[in-house]
Image (tube, grey):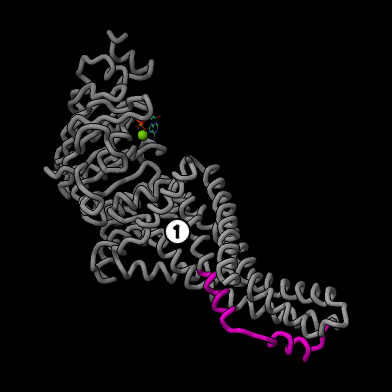
Amino acid sequence: MIEVKNISKTFGDRTVVSDVSFVFETGKTNLIIGESGSGKTTILKMMVGLLKPDTGAVEYDGRVFSEMNERQQQDVRKEIGMLFQGGALFDSMTVEENVAFPLRMFTDFKEEQIKERINFCLNKVKLENRNQLYPAELSGGMKKRASLARAIAGNPKYLFCDEPNSGLDPRTSLVIDDLILELTTEFNMTTVVITHDMNSVMQIGQKVMFLYGGKKWWEGDNKGVLTTTNKEVLDFVYASEFLKQLKPGLK
Amino acid sequence: MIFMFHIGRYFLLLKRAFSKPQKFRVYRKQFFFEINHIGISSLGIISIISIFMGGVVTTQAAFGFTSAWVPIYAVGFTTRESIILEFSPTIVSLLLAGKVGSNIASEIGSMRISEQIDAMDIMGVNSASFLIMPKILAAVFINPFLITISMFLGLLGGYTMGVFTGAVSSVQYITGIQYGFMAWKIWYALFKTAIFAFIITSIAAYNGYYTSGGALEVGKSSTRAVVWSSILILLADLLITQIVFTH
Ligand SMILES: Nc1ncnc2c1ncn2[C@@H]1O[C@H](COP(=O)(O)OP(=O)(O)O)[C@@H](O)[C@H]1O
Ligand SMILES: [Mg+2]
């Protein structure tokens, strides 16, 4: 469980995240949704410590992350896996070396054990027999899967995904979403997913926080999203003119 | 003011870069990779430059010393002194600032903008240390070897050119390069080389590590790395020469 308590962030004179509190539950896919620029990535960066919140705290199962020194934070981070928007695979390494990287760095595994773990992870994300390819040789969907394999290599307790299906076609997006949900359930991870894709919200939205202008505007789950009367949430859900026709009474 | 900011941030980065390796085995592998990547791979260009440099210095010296009072072996002597004290350590280091420096800055810079460095940090890896320390150590270790080779090839280039054009005889040249030879000058030159190697790699790594934006900024970081490391190499050269030769 990750708890975010009253965090805020201001860049210059622009408050990008304002007093947000939320509980991300273990074994669930917790979604942060909202339109572009609403502060989703900023919240995620504060949660993992790439940015320091101006106020408030982030707690990992009761451990207050923001009060730790660099070493202690590194220890918590070893329990974190992250899937970046662009994949962020290491260009100079093959798929296999990418997945092995956290293992070589933090475990005393023998080469056979590492091989075994690599194949286990690549198998989990359905990316077998691509071990020796470099990131530049992979398609968008394969990059995401390789990155997901690297994220779960160290058996993380917490999984973060920033827009896991941006730039992917709807079918491939669905595959990635299903994978995230499957892995979360199987390994009982606390998973945080940022998205602005309604398909994902419906598919994996076990818990949903809707951000609007840097504030937590609404929370619920994928069923609630459809039945809420919150105007901004509805505007987000029924974004197109086509969809608005399906929900008379809007506007 | 901005200058002080960069100096402060540079030293803080170095401090992070030289913290204890998280996994010795991984670092050792990276160190040997870098020796090849930023060291051995420059051998070709260094060889070509050194041979030509030696040739030019010898020819120039031969044309310069037309007076009967200057013995012909002075050509060899001059070539040796210039090559060992300045041309090999300084000029070749400037060349490496261009080749290796821009390579390091753009490599680390593109890792920064594509979030690969963030990915490392989030794994709990000390990205500054993993990316920078092996590069600095590799260059400080391997560059003196490269420069030794450069000195040798420079003298060989001088010999070939001098004898080929008839400016100096084989015996005179060899007498000249042995005349008044002091071994400490080589050690001094290699010491300078190690300092320059540190400047090249650390300045390049700094510029790459703090890149922000896109591909355009990676290009700018790489240019800045070359400009600043070149300037600092020349400043350091001036300083070291002052200290060593005026005492
Ligand atoms: N480092 C930064 N400096 C200044 N402004 C920033 C910075 N990072 C993000 N912002 C601004 O904060 C707002 C929210 O950004 P972000 O969290 O990336 O939104 P989202 O991920 O929801 O699209 C944007 O308007 C963005 O321009
Ligand atoms: Mg974002």
Does residue A140 appear left or right of residue A82 in this picture?
right
Which chain is disc 1 placed on? Answer: A
* Quarter residue A25 falls in: top left
Q: Residue B107, relative to residue A63: is it above or below?
A: below
* Quarter residue B128 falls in: bottom left
Give the amino acid at mark 1.
Ser
Please identify the quadrant where the C terminus of chain B is shown.
bottom right
Magenta stretch contains residue B183: yes
Q: Residue A25, relative to residue A108: is it above or below?
A: above
- Give the residue drawn at x 24%, y 64%: A107
* Quarter residue B22 falls in: bottom left
Out of B235 and A35, give the one closest to the viewer.
B235
The quarter of the rendering in which ligand 1 is drawn is top left
> At numbered mark 1, what does the secondary structure look like: helix, strand or loop?
loop
**Furthest-left residue in this view:** A62
Out of A206 and B209, give the one closest to the viewer.
B209
Q: Residue B140, relative to residue B201: is it above or below?
A: below
Does the image show residue B85? yes
- Give the residue drawn at x 17%, y 45%: A185
- Give the residue drawn at x 22%, y 28%: A20
- Percent position (x, y) of residue A167? 42, 38
Does the image show residue A139? no
Out of B113 and B84, give the one closest to the viewer.
B84
Question: What residue sits right under mark 1 in the picture?
Answer: A92
In the image, the residue with mark 1 has its CB under 8 Å from the nearest atom of ligand 2: no
Q: Residue A15, relative to residue A49: is it above or below?
A: above
Magenta stretch contains residue B65: no
- The residues colored magenta run B168-194
- Percent position (x, y) of residue B51? 70, 75
